[in-house]
Amino acid sequence: MKKRRRQKYTGVQKFIVFCFFLIVAASVALTVWLIRLSMDWANRSEWLDSVPEEEVEIFTEEIPEPAETEEKPVTEAEPEEEPEEDDSAGRVLEKQSDDWKLILVNKWNKVPKKYSVNLIELNNGHSIDERAYPDLQDMMDAARAEGLSPILCSSYRTSNMQRTLYEKQVQKYLDKGYSQEEAEAEAGKWVALPGTSEHQTGLAVDIVALSYQLLDRGQEDTAEQKWLMENSYKYGYILRYPTDKSDITGIYYEPWHYRYVGKDVAKELYESGLCLEEYLMGE
């Protein structure tokens, strides 16, 4: 029997086969890349993209070391310390507004015991008062139409969630050497005590820029925040804690925290420069 000769490929044929497999491999890689890209854009197309709240850290101003106090010998002649002035004087509402949009919640005015909220759950797991939802969606859609990328990083919180955030902030100050009392006082200027947070009403949201997801003063320099500060009132939302109202609101400046009060009141507050406490208490 004659042996069959193995067919030998010429250099040109080998090159053609190599190119064929190269094209196949490139096509597969391109297909995978396009699928992943389309999924990414599909996720970004959601008007309320967000990051999990536990991943958003509150970056406060540099926490100073606790002031050293000079110890003085206590003598009988030394007078007793004067009692602290009641900080709540003139800051407590005798009666909350009948308008659900104007409930006042701060360190002096707690969430009413019988307060209830009808929540709507968003597709990213966040929840807000269903009555404030349509205007929030309109606001986010309008911002995105301007080429901006605002995302929601915090919304409704339960009392337990608020307590967890507060205790974490207290611990930061304790780690710096503050006493328990000092740490609680300072933490309360950044994170409200459970029962005193607007987030528990379902009417407050924290919004950050997709490109800058830190809760610090640098947030105000993003294009998203600049747009929101100028336009949020058109949709019934106000910048709740302005930079020059901390002594009135009890909370330091937060250029990411927006509160729903309705379009009419939001417009009045924007034009007058008043914060919600001044508006409701007639100051």
Image (spheres, helix red, strand yellow):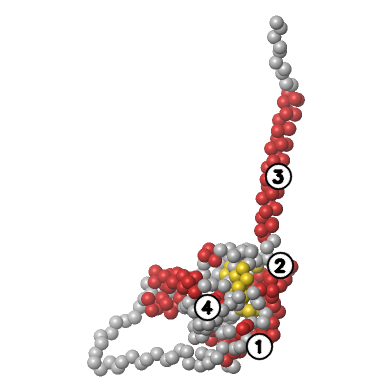
Q: How many marks?
A: 4
Mark number, residue 255: none
Amino acid type at circle 2 is: Arg
Q: Earlier in the sequence, mark 4 or mark 3?
A: 3
Which mark is in front, 4 or 1?
A: 4
Residue 101 vertical position relative to residue 174 in the rendered view, above or below: below
Q: Earlier in the sequence, mark 4 or mark 1?
A: 4
Residue at disc 4, secondary structure: loop
Q: Secondary structure at mark 1?
A: helix
- Residues 69 and 118: in front is 118
Q: Position of residue 233 (x, y in %)?
A: 68, 80
Kindly identify the amino acid type of the residue bearing the numbered disc 4: Ser
Q: Residue at x 56, y 88 (%)?
A: 96
Q: Which residue is mark 2?
A: 144
Circle 4 residue? 197
Is residue 34 in view? yes
Task: Using the numbered discs, state the Cα–Cα distance from disc 2 to disc 4 in whole angstroms.
Answer: 28 Å
Residue in the picture at 70% in, 48% down: 34
Q: Are marks 2 and 3 in contact (CB under 8 Å)?
A: no
Disc 4 vs disc 3: Cβ atoms closer than 8 Å? no
Judge whether 116 appears above or below 29 on screen: below
Q: Tell me what residue is drawn at x 38 percent, y 79 percent.
A: 181
Residue at the left extreme of this rendering = 76
Q: Residue 167 appears at what percent x and percent y?
A: 44, 72
The image position of residue 20, as x and y in percent, is 73, 32
Kindly identify which residue carries mark 3. 31
**Which of 104/130 is in front?**
130
The N terminus - image quarter: top right
